[in-house]
Amino acid sequence: MKAILSNRYLVFALRLVLGLIFIIAAIAKLLDVTGFVGTIANYGILSNILTHFYGYLIPWVELFIGCSLVLGTVVKISAALSMPLIVGFMIASGYALANAPGEGCGCFGTFLTLSHQGAITVDVLMLAAAFLLFFSTSQDFLTIEQLLSKLKINSRAVTWSGRIILVGFVVCTAVFVSVKLYQYFDVRSQEIATNMVADTVDVPDSLVSDLLERSLADGKPMLMFFYSSGCYTCEVAQPLVEGIEQEYGGRITPLHLKYIDNLALAESMKIEETPAVLVVSSKTVNGRYVVYRES
């Protein structure tokens, strides 16, 4: 074991492979943060607040870990940070595997589709790599600091520059997450937030629930349009909604519902006024529906 931990070529290979995996996963999530939040909601493990917090934060943490490992900066800290993160991924995949074995993990967004079994296998290998990196004794081979020192650049300046960059990265991450959370929870920003994030709801109406089940089983999201009679805004919105339905014909299931006749359903789906447009995209492992809202 000691020989393995001190093998600089092996340590470098582990740094590079693990770092690239984290970078690819982070980029895939950052390109579609809304989709990643929806994926987390599908697991049905976290509350709505934690789902959004986790969804906004994790891609940046992964990017930090990946860049740190590839560059060879604060390797031990990054390895330590990655281990509980990977364990969390394994727990989520295990939970989903026990409840919805047919679903994918969404670990790499649209870049790569992995089953939960495959995701757990990858996570085990990543955890082993992170463990070896944390206890390795040869972490300074082919690092950015080694390269710059060979170019006769002051090593102390390199060290402090690296620390400043890392601190700046953490600060930017904190600012980004804070802004996103402020937008989500601030009443004045609800219209923006609801257009960007997913929610989970129950559907008490058995007829609508049956329609949803059949639609999702066919791989089609359901577009639900709640309207009221004599509502001018509803009349304006209706041709727009019908235009969307025509554009996506065959790929979505449209459903128009009169608000006054579906009060219980509207309440369960958190609709307080009309017109309201919802897209039900999937079902969580605990039986709730993932809904995207449109003002």
Image (spheres, grey):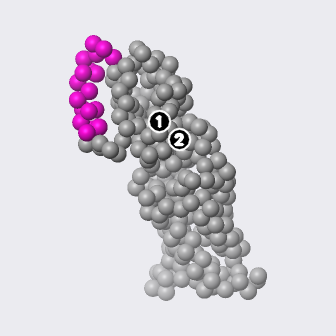
Residue position for label 1: 212
Q: Is residue 85 among what the camera can see?
A: no
Q: Residues within 10 Å of mark 1 (few under 14, many from 20)?
A: many
- Element on which disc 2 rests: strand
Q: Position of residue 156 (x, y in %)?
A: 54, 74
Q: Which residue is mark 2?
A: 283
Classify 233 as above or below 216: above
Q: Nearer the viewer, residue 245 or 191?
A: 245
Q: Say left or right for 56 vs 192.
A: right
The residue under the point 60% across, 43% down is: 285
Q: Is residue 110 magenta?
A: no
Q: Main secondary structure of the magenta part?
A: helix
Residue segment shown in magenta? 228-246
Q: Is residue 293 left or right of residue 124?
A: left
Q: Earlier along the polypeptide chain: callout 2 or callout 1? A: 1
Note whether 199 is above or below 89 in the view shown: above
State if disc 1 and disc 2 touch (CB < 8 Å).
yes
